[in-house]
Image (tube, grey):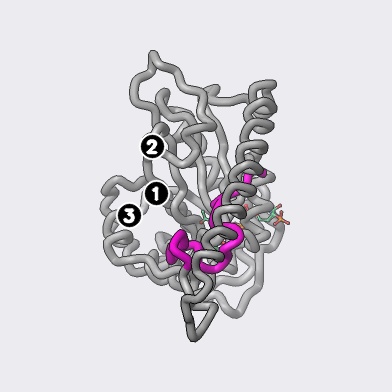
Amino acid sequence: MSRFPRGFVEDSSMEEPETHLRRPSICFRPINPSDLERLEQIHRDLFPIRYESEFFQNVVNGCDIVSWAAVDRSRPDGYSEELIGFVTAKFVSAKESEISDLIRYDSSKGEETLVYILTLGVVETYRKLGVAKSLIKEVIKYASSIPVCRGVYLHVIAHNNPAIRLYKRMSFRCVRRLHGFYLINGQHFDSYLFVYFVNGSRSPCSPLDLVVLAVNYMRSGIKLVASKLRMKQEEKGLKGVKCKDNRRCLLPTQTKRNLASPERVSSGYDYV
Ligand code: ACO
């Protein structure tokens, strides 16, 4: 970490009293079982989604999950190992992933994988110091070091501007908008899907990209028209069926996940 501002924050909200005008010394290490409580607490503080305790157990024990913790070693004893940021990720099979159509496969390499970022967070008092950028760089470096790994990808809720700016700044490509992807307190929210290709999986803007983009664009247009026609037919079929509350009436094709926006059910996502 090189770009810390001179005379770091004087912030009364910091937990330990000695933290005045210090220059932080941010280090990265794997998350381990002693981080469990803090990890749960930061997730609770930063995310609107509740994660199951099994998720945290898997993170701290490294069960199918890779993780990096950010700590500030300049903090006094008792705090110098406390998490101030983290990133958690898991491997998924490239062929079975939702971006399987975007991957350039190399048949000589066998089973190809992707790294999927599950959660990323930095506590408020350590933001805008480049901690998240460094955490993401760690993930990219790790993914790049695995020859069969084709990229790093993630979802981010569509209104999370700081995170979206971060991923764009780091040359992630926004490839999709998924409608009603998140269900939070009974409300649906769209998400963006960002990808960073590694190991020559795909060049940032090859001619192939443009062809795939055009084909996908046409495909999603056709799907949208087809689904609108289907919905009209279904509506006709539903005439005469009584429902006390229209907002709660499920059309036969709707699932709970996409209930919020029947018009968007059809396409599920847009290419962006
Ligand atoms: N001096 C001044 N500004 C700086 C410095 C510096 N030394 N270093 C970085 N910055 C700026 C960057 O340019 C960037 O500016 P911008 O937002 O105007 O583009 C900004 O600081 C943020 O960059 P980072 O410092 O790398 O990011 P940060 O450590 O602040 O963390 C994050 C960003 C993770 C989004 C944080 O705001 C957060 O934890 N939010 C809540 C949880 C969250 O939204 N997580 C992501 C959800 S998506 C997912 O989990 C897959």
- Mark number, residue 67: 1
Asked if the magenta segment contains residue 132, the reply would be: no
Task: Identify the image quadrant of residue 21.
Answer: bottom right
Query: Which three-letter amino acid code belongs to the residue tagged 3?
Result: Val
Q: From the image, state whether disc 2 or disc 1 is nearer to you.
A: 2
Residue 189: x, y in percent?
57, 65
Query: Which three-letter amino acid code belongs to the residue tagged 1?
Result: Ser
Contact between labelled residues 1 and 3, with CB atoms less than 8 Å apart: yes
- Mark number, residue 214: none
Contact between labelled residues 1 and 2, with CB atoms less than 8 Å apart: no
Contact between labelled residues 2 and 3, with CB atoms less than 8 Å apart: no
Report the magenta stretch's main SS: loop
Q: Quadrant of the C terminus?
A: top right
- Residue 47 visible at all: no
Query: Which three-letter amino acid code belongs to the residue tagged 2?
Result: Glu
Q: From the image, state whether disc 3 or disc 2 is nearer to you.
A: 2
Ligand 1 resides in the quarter of the picture at bottom right
- Residue 261 visible at all: yes
Identity of the residue drawn at 53% across and 52% down: 155
Residue 215: x, y in percent?
64, 31
Q: Name the residue furthest top.
A: 108
Lower sequence index among marks 3 and 2: 3
Determine which residue is flagged by label 3: 59
Determine which residue is flagged by label 2: 96
Asked if the magenta segment contains residue 262, the reply would be: yes
Q: Which segment is the magenta one?
A: 251-272
Measured in 3D between alpha carbons, the distance from the residue under mark 3 to the one under mark 2, in whole angstroms, is: 22 Å
Identity of the residue drawn at 45% across and 34% down: 143
